[in-house]
Image (cartoon, rainbow, N blue to C red):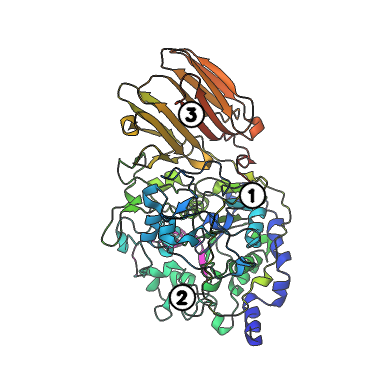
Amino acid sequence: MAELDRRRFLQLAGGAAALTALSDSIARAAAIPAAAGTGTLQDVEHIVVLMQENRSFDHYFGAMKGIRGFGDPRPVTLPSGKPVWHQSDGKKETLPFRPPGDDLGMEFLQGLNHDWAGGQKAFNKGKYDQWVPAKTATTMAYLTREDIPFHYALADAFTICDAYHCSFIGSTDPNRYYMWTGYTGNDGTGGGPVLNNAEAGYGWTTYPERLEAAGISWKIYQDIGDGLNAAGSWGWINDAYRGNYGDNSLLYFNTYRNAQPGSALYEKARTGTNAKAGEGYFDRLRADVQADRLPQVSWIAAPEAFSEHSNWPSNYGAWYIAQVLDALTSNPDVWARTALFITYDENDGFFDHVVPPYAPGSAAQGLSTAPTALDYFPGKTGYVAGPYGLGPRVPMLVVSPWSTGGYSCSETFDHTSIIRFIEKRFGVREPNISPWRRAVCGDLTSAFDFSRTNTAPAALPPTAGYYPPDRERHPDFVPTVPATGTMPRQEAGSRPTRPLAYAPYVDGAANTGTGRFQLTFSGGPQSGAQFLVTATNRTDGPWTYTAEAGKSLADSWNTTYSKGVTDLTVHGPNGFLRRFRSPGKTAGPEATARHNAATGALDLTFTNAGSTDAHLTVTNAYGGAPQTFTVRPGTTVTHALDLRATRNWYDVTVVSAEDSTFLRRLAGKVETGAAGLSDPGIRTV
């Protein structure tokens, strides 16, 4: 870098002194206690959202300890019969791989397909088996703590959400419309539905407009580039180190485009720093924090080079995130009342192994107690039919005085969850969020503990070394795919977990007269849930089922199609799994399970519709000796499985001495309202 360029970069960064002191200033974020208050959500006075670009959860955090990553003990099975990580192009399988290189966090890793067509192809109606044909083998590339130490350290200091999904199977703008408006014009209002980055000018109401009408202060922090208007391309410019990379998607709405200087929409969404004129990226944010005039709700849009969009290096983004934290903690009194959400708009095409919740397109694909019209796109010329989302998992880090301690939170979220957190805090409802999304996705409050009073300093690695060595664009780094893949494992160790409201159950019942097998689904009394059903002995499916909180629904399968044998596997939230394997028309035993929040036990009930005794053996893979129960015809036997030794986690099989076909597998976690520890079944190094 030329000396003039180096001086210029340090000016934008806030000065050389800020870089050398960065580690200490960011460590304050975890050391500053929450302001004394009510011990509730009302203590959050400032909400800040930094949405970066285009990284999947497995791509960044699949190797991190204590989260649902590469060591997931209950992955979805592909139609091939193999675990979901075995992605094939029809000739060769590619497993997740770490690209060869010494400084991957600073590599210009190639970007991948992330449009509607490519996303729906990889998703493949829920089969999830076309990632390599749709995205190339680079889709399976991932990074580790060695590559992105700041991101890992931030997760270890605060709270990471390992069931947070982008909202849309596709590109940036529709995902950001979900974050800023609750949908992408799904009902056709105002120019929707928008399935791409057309940025043509739209007419539906945005959430900041609703905040403005309610008297809630808000602002977008960004650099104006060459101007936030048509002549300045709304922040899109050739200089990757200025502007907002077009990531202020409010500027694609006509009310903002037509706003005049002096109006609220103009001043709050179309102004910002002017790096071209010598202003630093963070000058206005830091000034507002230090003067205690940070708005109640703020969004931050980074310049292209710092957005983490491939091919830009991840650690350029680490430097930018650290600077945001440095600004927010420059006034401890403000930080003590602030919650920062750091997330990513979409996955870019990088693979994630968790099949996202989605709405059925018809009764042949599943059912929902919540209306799904706004969540399934019927198709049009150039765009195949398919669910709008949820999309693949993306990282979400919750950074605040109430989320310290290195926790994970495994409630299902998406970008509309950010709006719902703001809704819950400030009471401004967003009507564009569909009933189905409200049933499936939480409001992010479960990622916080508002009773926390003690904090501990966080030792975060410095990021001064991540500032760009030049201000140039670089060619793609295209990783070499291993000739023979090996499945990566996660770091050793567990992670504390936030308590959740889930109490799901799925019950099976055979109709021996018709040969049909029925499943009944519920998320429990307090939380809705989506369930994915697969069958390795059938060529149809998978199927998706959504039950709103306090509701249940049922569907049945004809075992004639599967050669007389039922073999259905159900995946639900937070590692929940049920497997039902039975002979189709032979009456016999059944096992059902309920989570007992009061005792922490798994309450099992065994019945027997057969004509002879059934001897059922129960084994918990997580510990304890097997137990055998005799269930006489027409009787019921109950058993409370003690889970205290297994952190309230279980992975139970029930087999019959009389019929080798019979198998029930029951796995998940019994929530008791208390914080816990991560799934002990996660495979680690």
Mark 2 secondary-structure assignment: helix
Of tags 1 and 3, the one toward the viewer is 3
* Residues under numbered marks 2 and 3 in contact, where contact means CB atoms less than 8 Å apart: no
Q: CA distance from mark 2 to mark 3?
A: 56 Å
Q: Point out the image quarter for the N terminus.
A: bottom right
Give, as a three-letter code, the residue at label 1. Answer: Lys
Mark 3 secondary-structure assignment: strand
Of labels 1 and 3, earlier in sequence is 1
- Name the foreground residue: 337 vs 464: 464
- Seen in the picture, residue 34 relative to 582 is either above or below; the reply is below
Find residue 235 and name its label. 2
Residue 304: where, in percent of width, then height? 51, 72
Does the stretch in magenta take in 549? Answer: no
Quarter-of-image position of residue 642: top right
Q: CA distance from mark 1 to mark 3?
A: 29 Å
Q: Is residue 137 left or right of residue 467?
A: left
Range of the magenta residues? 201-222
Residue 325: where, in percent of width, then height? 64, 64
Give, as a three-letter code, the residue at label 3. Answer: Arg
Residue tagged 3: 664
Residue at (65, 82) in percent of width and height: 6
